[in-house]
Image (cartoon, rainbow, N blue to C red):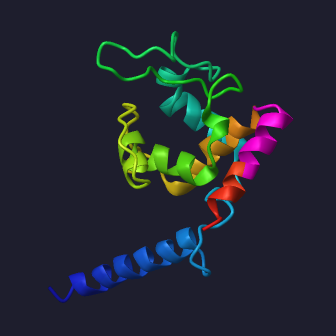
């Protein structure tokens, strides 16, 4: 039991630090959970992790706006024709990390998009790289709208 205490303390300290990072020292989330990104890594990770569902060119599934037999919408595009850019960084980050249902449930919404969580497969930095890559492909207008939504997430 004594050998586990240092490891347990390290986990607790890391969890507290992550909470401060995520909520910020002023109690609000940072302007973006996405720090400096590696676009090449983001593109490679997108191709390896996301492209099978969302398309190699971020085009989404065919008929992505029409629910399938299970009632879920197919994976949307992550290019400017989709709705990814309609959401701020915190929601997008949580959507990837926690999965759609959990990310929305934390915001008081009930909707199962079918998007799985990748917390066990991707680090926070890798998620940030993927989002950075996706965002880098959008036209300026969509990037500006998305940046404004990211800033609005900070407003209490």
Q: How many marks?
A: 0
From the viewer's side, name the closer residue of 17 and 74: 74
Does residue 24 appear to the left or right of 137 in the view shown?
A: left
The answer to whether one can see residue 40 in this image is no
Q: Residue at x 37, y 23 (%)?
A: 72
Asked if residue 3 is positioned above or below residue 96 in the image, the reply reads below
**Residue range highlighted in magenta:** 138-148
Q: Tell me if residue 27 can be seen.
A: yes
Q: Position of residue 122 (x, y in %)?
A: 46, 48
In this rendering, position of residue 47 left or right of residue 99: right
> In the figure, residue 87 lies in which quadrant?
top right
Viewer-proximal residue among 6 and 112: 112
- Please check the rendered image and state whether residue 86 is part of the magenta-colored stretch, yes or no: no
Magenta region's main secondary structure?
helix
Residue 145 on the magenta span: yes
Q: Position of residue 44 (x, y in %)?
A: 61, 34
Query: Vertical placement of 98 versus 85: above or below?
Result: below
């Amino acid at each position: 039991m004594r050998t586990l205490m240092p490891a347990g303390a390290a986990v607790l300290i890391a969890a507290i630090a992550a909470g401060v990072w995520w909520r910020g020292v002023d109690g609000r989330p940072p302007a973006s959970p996405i720090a400096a990104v590696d676009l090449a890594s983001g593109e490679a990770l997108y191709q390896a992790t996301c492209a099978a569902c969302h398309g190699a060119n971020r085009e989404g599934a065919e008929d992505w706006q029409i629910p399938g037999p299970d009632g879920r919408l197919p994976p949307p595009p992550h290019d400017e024709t989709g709705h990814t850019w309609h959401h701020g960084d915190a929601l997008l980050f949580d959507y990837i990390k926690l999965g759609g249902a959990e990310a929305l449930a934390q915001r008081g919404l009930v909707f199962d998009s079918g998007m799985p969580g990748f917390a066990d497969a991707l680090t926070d930095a890798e998620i940030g790289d993927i989002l950075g890559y996706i965002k880098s492909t959008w036209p300026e207008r969509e990037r500006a709208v998305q940046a404004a939504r990211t800033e609005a997430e900070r407003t209490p």
